[in-house]
Amino acid sequence: MSTLLETLLRLTVLGSLLTGVVLLLERVFRRRLSRAAGYYLWLLVLLRLCLPFGVTLRVPTAEEFPTPAAQTGGAPVQTAPLPGGAELVPAAPRPPVGEAADGTDGASPSPGGTDRGASLRTLLTAPALWTAVWGLGAAVCLGRCVRGYLRFSRAVRRTAEPPCPAARALLRRLDPAGRAALAESPHVPAPMLLGVLRPLIVLPAGVDDPARLEDILRHELVHARRHDLLYKWLTAAVTSLHWFNPLMYLVRREVARRCELSCDEAVLRTLDQRGRRRYGETLLALATPPPPGMGVLAVTLCEEKAHLRERLVSIAGYRKGGPAAAVLAAILALAVGGCALVGGAETVPPETAPPRETPPEAASALLEDGTGYDLPNGMTLAVPGAVSEELLVFPAGEAELGEAPYLVWVYEKKSYEDGMTDYGSPAGFLFCILRYDQVEYEQNYLAVNGGAGGLDFFARDGAYYYGWGTATDVQYYRSDEGETDAGGQGWKDWEALFEAFPAIQADFIARNGLTACDGGAALERDFFWPGEHRYVSYHNADYTQSMTLTLSQPAVQGEGGIWCVERWQDNNYGSRYTVLPSTDVPVAEYYADLQEQTGRVHP
């Protein structure tokens, strides 16, 4: 994906999140927040949507796979040829299925629709295509706004006539600085403001009542002083850039709605009770839909009657805001501004991530009524006292721990005893806790894509990953039930035991000073290793074999680097498989040593 599209998607996600924050704040504080404050909060959303920079949050990663490039002080990645003449191609976040390294299908052309299908896949995964689609959509959206505004503005200026002397005199009194000009045109359905640099208030024909003229001019002069038309042009431009995001239509609507509400608020501040009632009557009398084609750029006094209800209710309930409202507006502006400053997030490698250990004495996760069991190496397992009588807990001995990674096995007591009585072998296995060092974690879990199932890594310390193993078949057994009675009380009691697992895990982490983690997250990452990546794709003539290799540089120093295959994907079935070297040292150390040897051989 191109850098432009990646930046755009990042901004649209951040802007959407900030939109949700502003909507929530408006809903919570709608009776206390001034209309003007609510209006300008949306300006922060627009800035977040269009400014490609901001503060990057550093988030500790839950996945602990080492990054040898960070250990070796990795130099910039160099593109290098592969053996046999295969080429490296820049990697996208996901491999393009069935595409070769040079952009072709990776094999000799096959007859009929196969080549056409490959070409179509290549086309649909090309960043240039999606950049063009986005550019065309943005141009159409913004072009419609510009075309509609220019057509309407030219028509108004062609038919404009000087206003009556009373209107000109009233404008001079309300606007002594001469900020806006005044004209009258039969082409406008309601009073409105045109012109960003030279504001022009346009009156519809036949408005000659002095009180009504004053309401109109006060309203439009507020728009002119605040440069609301410039604000609306910014809204049109930014939302056009994000035309593919449905929330942009909500942003446009909210900006237009808040614009008029805040303008009403500014006018009402200068009027007494009688003047406010007259102002509401003016809105209702001149209500009309916006001019065709103007959309978000319409800066009018009135809207169609169906949309006036909120404004009239606001006028009826108007109260001048005090210091508390100003303080609230400042606090919310700082809060939303702080959110708007966030420009993204990056994970912190384990080497630089802050320690996350929780002292057992301060851990809220400890079971208050737990029954404890001593495990090897001074560790402890506790289970809730309410279920302890239903369990059999078998801690590993120190000798066993030297030969296997298991710390403890836990069984349901009744199933265990009935299985031993009837068959001489236990049933009722609930869970076990095992631990792997870095090499075991990589070779016995990551390299085999999580193994055969039933194993999740939930915690770690400085030396080990701690796994939670469960049965992949039903272990429930009763001698007197024959076939399993899923509706019986025994089965319900069995299933209730599983509800205690999260509390047991949390207690184990807190009690033994471990750090919670998701050891399986490494298998879901796009890449193990930082830096640049390449794909090499292959298929035979009839596509019965089609695969894509993901290449990375896990270690870089000097002018070159070690390229490795870190994953391969079966394009026919979509399955991805991890590739790690079989080694008795951590993979990061293996690649770093290999890089050092390569540097000595090829200086």
Image (cartoon, rainbow, N blue to C red):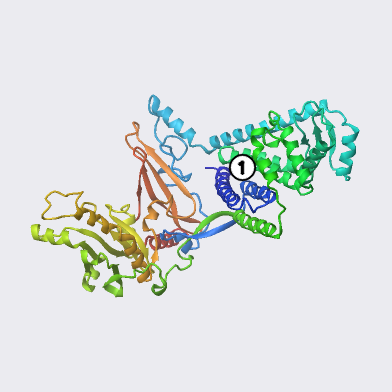
Count of marks, rendered view:
1
Q: Residue at x 43, y 38 (%)?
A: 100
Q: Amino acid at mark 1?
A: Val
In the foreground, 465 or 497: 497
Residue 135 appears in the picture as rendered? yes
- Circle 1 SS class: helix
Q: Residue at x 37, y 60 (%)?
A: 587
Residue at the (15%, 60%) spot, across then down? 426
On the picture, is 63 further left or further right than 181?
left
Q: Position of residue 297 (x, y in %)?
A: 70, 36
Q: Is residue 364 above or below residue 292?
A: below
The residue located at (13%, 48%) in the rendering is 483
Q: Which residue is mark 1?
A: 251
In the image, 191 versus 102, the foreground residue is 191
Above or below residue 269? Residue 308 is above
Is residue 549 left or right of 315 when viewed as pictured?
left
Specify whether residue 475 is in view: no
Q: Quadrant of residue 222?
A: top right
Q: Position of residue 353 (x, y in %)?
A: 48, 65
Q: Position of residue 166 (x, y in %)?
A: 89, 35
